Amino acid sequence: MANPGETSADRLLAHKGIRRVPTPRAELFDLPGFLPAQMCADLIDLIDRDRRPSTIADPNGDNYFRTSETCDLPADLPLVQDLERRLHDLNGIDPVHGEPVQGQRYAVGQEFKAHTDYFEPTGQDFAQFCSVAGNRTWTFMIYLNDVEAGGATRFKVVDKIFQPETGKLVCWNNHRPDGTLNPATLHHGMKVRKGVKYVITKWYREKPWGW
């Protein structure tokens, strides 16, 4: 792999149960049952305790672009440390390249419209968000609960939709094999139609996280 802030398809596929989406346009995987149900429930409690309105890096004039709620999970909690260990066992990425674990909550009608996780070099806030740790490399997202209706994650370019399922992990490389940013990772956290959706997201960076 290119640097300690990245993993590889070979590393991930060595883990039992992981599946790669059959497309040449992106390195995109899922792993059902990555987290046990009780751990998911405990993480939901943390999110409910500390949630706040979500924001986006580069405001685009659409006040309804990301309508979920968000929280950063305390790194010193044993529960969060357990989660970090499980992720490291899977991806082998040096933990110093990881952003703090983030939790999201989507109520009925809330969504995160189609976006990529990397920071656009032409974006007005690129220097602010990437000057220390560089751009995002890999994304690891975990659904914490089943959702009664809606709440899927749609990767339109590669024609793949993931349905929320307790403990299921979805991960992808935000770059192409040549190291350039990959717009085919565009994805949409679709509206919840019934129930509430809880998600954990862990992003990794090109350089050590130093904020």
Image: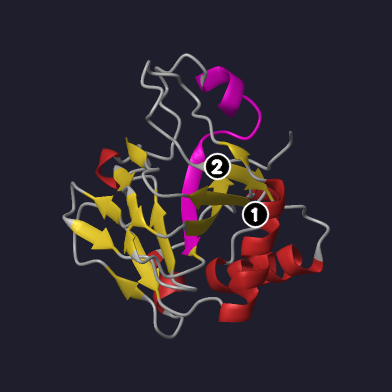
Task: Inspect the magenta stretch and tell me whether residue 46 lies in it.
Answer: no
First to last magenta residue range: 126-142
Answer few, some or many: residues within 10 Å of disc 2's Cα (few below 14, many 20 plus, some between 14 and 19). many
Q: Is residue 172 above or below residue 84?
A: above
Q: Is residue 104 above or below residue 23?
A: above
Residue 211, percent from left and from top: 74, 33
In the displayed structure, does residue 88 sit left or right of residue 81?
left
Task: Residue 115: tell me if it is visible.
Answer: no
Quarter-of-image position of residue 129: top right
Residue 156, percent from left and from top: 19, 48
Answer few, some or many: residues within 10 Å of disc 1's Cα (few below 14, many 20 plus, some between 14 and 19). many
Residue 155, percent from left and from top: 25, 51
Q: In this view, does 174 lie above or below 45?
A: above
| Residue located beneath label 1 in the image | 47
Residue at point 49%, 73% (across, down)? 167
What is the C-alpha distance between the residues marked 1 and 2?
9 Å
**Residue type at the position of mark 2:** Glu
Residue 69 tag number: 2
Residue 209, percent from left and from top: 69, 41
The reply to whether discs 1 and 2 touch (Cβ–Cβ < 8 Å) is: yes
Residue 125 vs residue 168, the one in the foreground: 168
Provide the secondary structure element on which disc 1 rests: helix
